[in-house]
Amino acid sequence: MIWVSWRRQRAQLLTLLGLLVVGAGVITLLRSSMIDSLTSAGLTGCVSVPLDQCTAPAAAAKSFAEAWANPLDIARMSILFGPALIGVFIGAPLFARELEQGTHVLAFTQSVSRTRWMVSKLVMALVPALVVLAVLQSMVSWWLSAAGTLGPLMNGPFTALNFSIGHVSPAGYALFAFALGTFIGVMSRRTLVAMTAGLGAFVVVRFALAGLVDRLVPAQRVEVSPDKELTVYTDGSLVLDHGYLDAAGQPVAQDKVNALTAACKSVPQGSGTAESQQEFLACLPKSGLAKRYADFIPESQAWQVHLVDAAIFGALAVLLLAGTTWALRRQS
């Protein structure tokens, strides 16, 4: 059964192999060229430190960032779109084409059970695709790490694009997209319908669940006096909520905060001076705004968010594959 599946899906497998070889070669060459650019511009020591600590000329860092922004963004986008492409071009046609052309009847009349036939096709289609995606994802991460804080990583792991291509999240997305495509393909029995509907459904679910994972990971809270700055906005953390606390430690409603801060702004004389700013900050605790707070997930816990993210989409994929099995067993 594995041999039959290989014969029927060899074009797809050879295409994946070609993408892997070409992609790995291009990334390796571009990374080598980028490192040469870093060395020639004297920016090697700046990739592992914040930009404000870079000792190289600011013009050199800006020139490097502008020159390599597009290639690095294209590499990230290729990993971002990878799961959707797996669902559309591998998952959706897998069973839909068999049902549409009627070739599934021959498979059903053989001594091999329907479950074994389905599992062999799923394994031969899904495993190579996941391997190729994982290898290319690792190579893109390898390339991004060479650019360090001079590249997209300067924005932290929780920006939308960085998060979507990090850790195990792409594997979870790919598994879900593949399972969604196969399920719609079996239910619709039409390849084109499965491809278009699968893509649309995948995009909708990805956006719908984008904020759910952040709420499932325990957040930390930091509290500072009104005259202090919250560093969580600049250290790569994911800020979930922020605002002011009253003297009892309870969050103050935003409309009340606006009214109290507006009242404090009207107290100082000589607006814009250092003394007026101090008077404004001193007024906040007296008005009831005792502290500023922020609920956040630190950068060091990004891997936990990725695990939860992959678990959510993996669980949905398992349900869809179970539905696919049920639907196939009912096909005549």
Image (cartoon, helix red, strand yellow):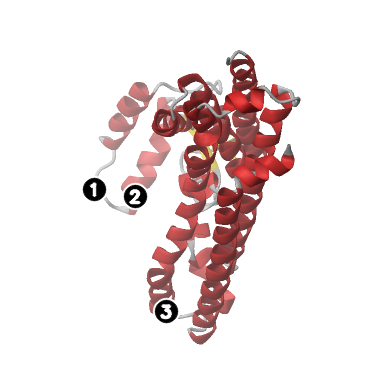
Residues at discs 2 and 1 in contact (Cβ within 8 Å) = yes
Q: Quadrant of the C terminus?
A: top right
Q: CA distance from mark 3 to mark 2?
A: 39 Å
Q: Which residue is mark 1?
A: 270
Q: Position of residue 201 (x, y in %)?
A: 43, 28
Q: CA distance from mark 3 to mark 1?
A: 41 Å
Q: CA distance from mark 2 to mark 1?
A: 8 Å
- Pick the front one: 306 or 286: 306
Image quadrant assignment for residue 146:
bottom right
Instruction: Provide the secondary structure element on which disc 1 rests.
Output: loop
| Numbered tag placed on residue 193 in the rendering | none
Task: Residue at 39%, 64% (x, y): give it.
Answer: 70
Residues at discs 3 and 1 in contact (Cβ within 8 Å) = no
| Numbered tag placed on residue 275 in the rendering | 2
Residue situated furthest right in the rendering: 111
Within 10 Å of disc 2 (Cα), the crowding (few <14, some 14-19, many 20+) is: few
**Residue 292 at least partly seen:** no
Residues at discs 3 and 2 in contact (Cβ within 8 Å) = no
Which is more N-terminal, label 1 or label 3? 3
Residue situated furthest bottom in the rendering: 40
- Pick the front one: 281 or 240: 240
Amino acid carrying label 1: it is Gly
Q: Which residue is mark 3?
A: 60
Q: Position of residue 236 (x, y in %)?
A: 54, 50
Instruction: Provide the secondary structure element on which disc 3 rests.
Output: helix
* Circle 3 or circle 2, nearest the eye: 3
